[in-house]
Amino acid sequence: MARVFENVLVFDGTGSSPFPGEVRIEGNRIAAVAKGSHKISQEGAEVIDGQGATLMPGLCEPHAHITYPDMLKLRELGDTPPEEHVFVTMHNARKMLDAGFTSLYSAASSKPRTEVVVRNEINAGRIPGPRFRAASPEIVSTGGLGDERQLHMYHQGIELIADGADEVRRTVRMCIREGVDQIKINISGDNFVRLGQDGACTYTEEEVKAAADEANERGVWLSCHSRADKSVRMALKFGFRVLYHCEHSTDATLDLIEAAKDRIFLAPAIGANYRLAHHAQEWGITHDVAERMGVFKTIEQTAQTYNKLRKRGVRVLPGGDYGFIWNPIGTNARDLEYFVNLFGYTPAETLSAATMLGGQIMGMPDLGLIKEGFLADLLLVDGDPTADIKILQDQDNLLMIMKDGAYHKAPRPRRKAGKGSARAREMADA
């Protein structure tokens, strides 16, 4: 069925100001976009009166962890049996779509095939969920971020332990065999696990090169946990596509990032640390505990680094590391607000990063914009998120969610339709 959205404010994803207009959908594609009213044929179409609401592309989460069960500690991932973990992931996929995220780029699965099988079920149309790029578990060195083992007792978290170039190569090959879209390597440590390790590398260049050689040879993307400056440099040297965190980057390393900006993507994943610092008291993370963990220092360094990267025009996307008890799955739109408040982005720039750049990180050149010929992954929002980006945190403001031209959430009227409808019509008439 063809559908025409009229009387809407169109945020097209480019970062330009929204405009009053109309959009026609045919099948799973955007067939026409027009400014003003009565410009697009409604013949043979269902007509949806947006009542002045904002029509925008669906959001992309660039650092998704939908195998995370809103946990307190990483070892809870190992305690979850594989069968139950599939259901956790399925439910989380739906939560993300309910929250307006129509595409997910994973930053690691908890088990080798969990995300692969859920991705396949979504693609087959048997379960609801966003478009999904599935990842390997985090490939980790002994003592690196994610190694939950103790000498006297075995524990498992999100990791696959691999030491030495040959073992790293074998692990990468195994994950590719099982069908992942990308490989995740933890090149650096993290204060979340051990204070002072966020500035340390946990893999050698030889080991990182072995992973990269295998992935690049077999056409699989590479992403990495890279807080330490040296880890960022290694990731750039060996062709990693997505770099997470990077807050310890020196100005010289920022120069290297800028030089590679047309082939890489960054995501700071600030939400996990911000929530840990300010909203985790009931789970024992008081202000003093967070300070001892270095969380406030990490937030400050991240803000400094990403204010610089914004000015350099690097492709940086909001989101990441949701799935802990203090920042549960489905609340990922909070990171949009942090981009504005901490990194200096405008709401329109932030939304463009979450939509247009989302299509790019997904490797889909016809996704992430409201543009003729693009895929119809769309949200109808009660209000203007370029004026108040926080409205996307309330799912009641999502009047419609469309993925691939089909309703996940059918359109419903605005709660304050009169005011918005009049504004849109006045702008259209002008």
Image (tube, rainbow, N blue to C red):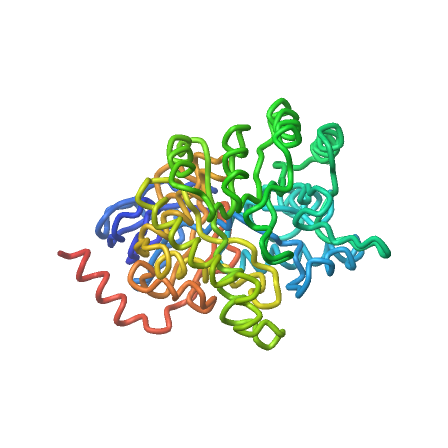
Relative vertical location of residue 376 with respect to residue 278 in this rendering, above or below: above
Residue at figure coordinates x 42%, y 36% from the top left: 257
Q: Name which residue lies at 22% across and 65% down.
A: 423
Quarter where residue 335 is shown: bottom left
Q: Is there any visible trace of residue 364 in the rendered image?
A: yes
Estimate the x, y position of residue 188 in percent, counting from the top left: 59, 44
Q: Is residue 26 visible?
A: no
Give how far across and how far down residue 222 sits, in percent: 58, 35
How many numbered marks are there? Answer: 0
Residue 154: horizontal and vertical position, in percent? 83, 54
Quarter containing the C terminus: bottom left
Nearer-the-camera pick, 108 or 409: 108
Q: Nearer the viewer, residue 58 or 190?
A: 190
**Residue farthest along the bottom direction in this orientation:** 282
Tell me where residue 116 appears, x and y as whole percent. 68, 42
Would you say 12 lies left or right of 293 here?
left
- The residue drawn where x is 31% and y is 70% is 417
Q: Which residue appears farthest toward the top when viewing the image?
A: 217
Q: Is residue 303 above or below residue 164?
A: below
Q: Is residue 356 left or right of residue 203?
A: left
Q: Residue farthest to the right?
A: 152
Please report the residue visible at 54 percent of the width from the left and 33 percent of the height from the top: 234
